[in-house]
Image (tube, rainbow, N blue to C red):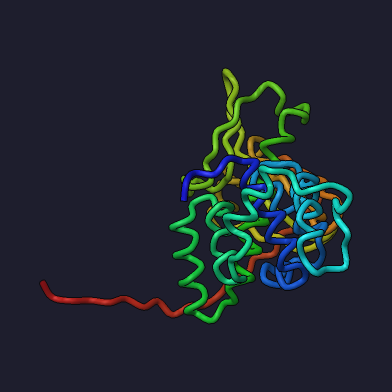
Amino acid sequence: MKKLTLREKSILAGLYLSKFDREGLKTFEFDNFTEAFNVIGLALGVQPTSVKNYRDEFDPLFPNNRQGWHKRPTRDYCKAIYNAFGSLNLKDFTALLKQIIYKEHDIDVLMEEIEKSQGEKESSFAKRLITGQAAEQYFKIKYKEIEQFKNFEIEDTTKAGCGFDFKLVSSNIFYGVEVKGLNEVNGSIALTNKEHSVASFLKERYFLFIVKNFRENPFHEFYQNPLDSRLIFNRTEQKIIQVNWTTKV
């Protein structure tokens, strides 16, 4: 498959939601279309309304309860995507959608398969992953609007394992920003032991940035030095069985 443009990816997402409708929402455990538009749109790096508009573009072609843009023909560049991918079944189209959304597709699919083999639901992993990516993209879009961050440049450290997702750098200081996403207005978030330790070390230079309410209308809250804020973190310990595999060479 040729490399798709960002617009083509948005069109594919709209086609998926139009064709599979409620079944498509259920596959990713979205509660409603607004949540799907918000999460998928932001994860792709486009406006959620773009995904909605492309869904509406295809609605006249499928037997659902929406009329969509029925007063004009489907635009040629949308029809091209429909002709190329519109016949895919749910399983294959879902795999395609993950391919264009997952940030590190091969690794993310591997982690998905491992969790599934351990009894986790594939759809739960997909929703967690895509919601996390959506929150990260939201931060990348919004951070310059925040007074404390407006003179900083951004570095993506999500794969560095350093205890925060983004490093904000100025001429004489850096901040670490950990981004979390919530589908509702309220909920629980967790810091890993490393994130907690780094927050404890960086103190005022560590920010917890929480994107809330993907289900309706996303907004954000952030906490500088979150361990010394109104947030109360409770330590949770889990005992696990460590399994090793040995051989002689």
Residue 5 visible: yes
Furthest residue toward front: 73
Q: Position of residue 176 (x, y in %)?
A: 60, 38
Q: Position of residue 223 (x, y in %)?
A: 75, 43
Furthest residue toward left: 249
Residue 179 visible: no
Q: Position of 118 compared to 186: left or right?
A: left
In front here: 105 or 209?
105
Q: Which residue appears at 70% of the width and 41% of the height? A: 46
Q: Quadrant of residue 144?
A: top right
Q: Which residue appears at 76% of the width and 61% of the height? A: 61
Q: Position of 16 compared to 237: left or right?
A: right
Q: Position of 116 compared to 196: left or right?
A: left
Q: Quadrant of residue 155?
A: top right
Q: Which residue appears at 61% of the width and 41% of the height? A: 6
In front here: 175 or 214?
214
Q: Which residue appears at 76% of the width and 67% of the height? A: 21
Seen in the picture, residue 6 relative to 128 is either above or below; the reply is: above
How many numbered circles does the render carry?
Answer: 0
Q: Quadrant of residue 63?
A: bottom right
In front here: 62 or 50?
62
Seen in the picture, residue 142 relative to 111 is either above or below; the reply is: above
For the C terminus, give its image quadrant.
Answer: bottom left
Q: Position of residue 159 (x, y in %)?
A: 48, 47
Seen in the picture, residue 32 relative to 224 is either above or below; the reply is: below
Q: Position of residue 54 (x, y in %)?
A: 75, 49
